[in-house]
């Protein structure tokens, strides 16, 4: 099975090579790429939660996951979380101390399921809205400047396109 991220990267490459210069097509292409990133985030978050819960996800977790994904999509932070997940995975691979979670980030079930944080927000009664609130314009923070510097030399994570177009 080809990972969804591979399809997303291949679609982005194809789009960049074949998109016409017309504004309507460009706008539609951007919307399609954003939609694909949002679907990728949803797929990965739900798949990882399923793994963490041993295949038995209580309804409260399902409801919370769907709510958080809806807010993340509305605010356009799906690509941010995919990047942060790669960043945190790279930090762990390089033994950079990141702790179980920073600030209000552990209030997110999506962050927990992606492995960005290590604290189950439902188990500990943490609220998502402290981290990301649709009514507030502040950007969510997950890592600090020291962590960014420690991982600065991390090579970009590229997945080769393993199927034909």
Image: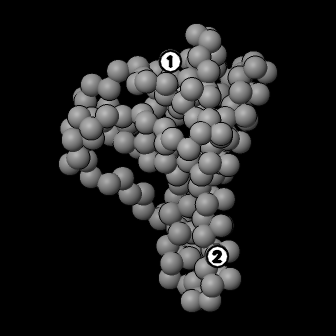
Q: Earlier in the sequence, mark 2 or mark 1?
A: 2
Give the foreground label among 2 and 1: 2
Is residue 100 in sight in this rendering?
Answer: yes
Q: Position of residue 158 (x, y in %)?
A: 38, 57
Mark 2 touches mark 1? (CB < 8 Å): no
Closer-to-camera residue (147/15): 147
Residue at point 69%, 31% (across, down): 65
Name the element at disc 2.
helix
Query: For mark 1, does the 10 Å Cα neighbourhood hold few (<14), some (14 to 19), or many (20 or more) residues?
Result: many
Quadrant placement of the C terminus: bottom right
Residue at point 59%, 16% (across, down): 126
Q: Residue furthest front?
A: 136
Question: Is 15 located above or below residue 87 in the figure?
Answer: below
Q: Position of residue 130 (x, y in %)?
A: 57, 26
Closer-to-camera residue (110/127): 127
Give left or right: position of 84 versus 47: left
Question: Is 2 located above or below residue 56 in the figure?
Answer: below
Q: Position of residue 157 (x, y in %)?
A: 36, 53
Residue 119 - label = 1
Residue at point 62%, 35% (across, down): 133
Query: For mark 2, does the 10 Å Cα neighbourhood hold few (<14), some (14 to 19), or many (20 or more) residues?
Result: few
| Real-space CA distance between mark 2 and mark 1, rounded to the nearest whole angstrom | 38 Å
Question: Is 46 located above or below residue 58 in the figure?
Answer: below
Residue at point 27%, 52% (across, down): 155
Give left or right: position of 98 versus 107: left
Which residue lies under the disc numbered 2? 27
Name the element at disc 1.
loop
């Amino acid at each position: 099975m080809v990972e969804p991220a591979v399809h997303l990267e291949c679609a982005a490459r194809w789009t960049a090579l074949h998109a016409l210069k017309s504004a309507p097509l460009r706008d539609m292409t951007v919307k399609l790429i954003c939609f694909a990133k949002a679907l990728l985030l949803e797929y990965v978050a739900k798949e990882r939660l399923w793994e963490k819960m041993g295949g038995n996800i209580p309804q409260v977790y399902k409801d919370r996951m769907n709510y958080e994904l809806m807010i993340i999509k509305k605010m356009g932070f799906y690509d941010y979380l995919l990047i942060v997940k790669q960043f945190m995975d790279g930090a762990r691979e390089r033994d950079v101390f990141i702790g179980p979670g920073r600030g209000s980030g552990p209030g997110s079930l999506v962050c927990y399921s992606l492995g960005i944080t290590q604290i189950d927000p439902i188990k500990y009664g943490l609220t998502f809205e402290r981290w990301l609130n649709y009514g507030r314009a502040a950007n969510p923070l997950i890592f600090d400047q020291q962590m960014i510097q420690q991982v600065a030399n991390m090579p970009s994570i590229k997945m080769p396109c393993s199927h034909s177009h």
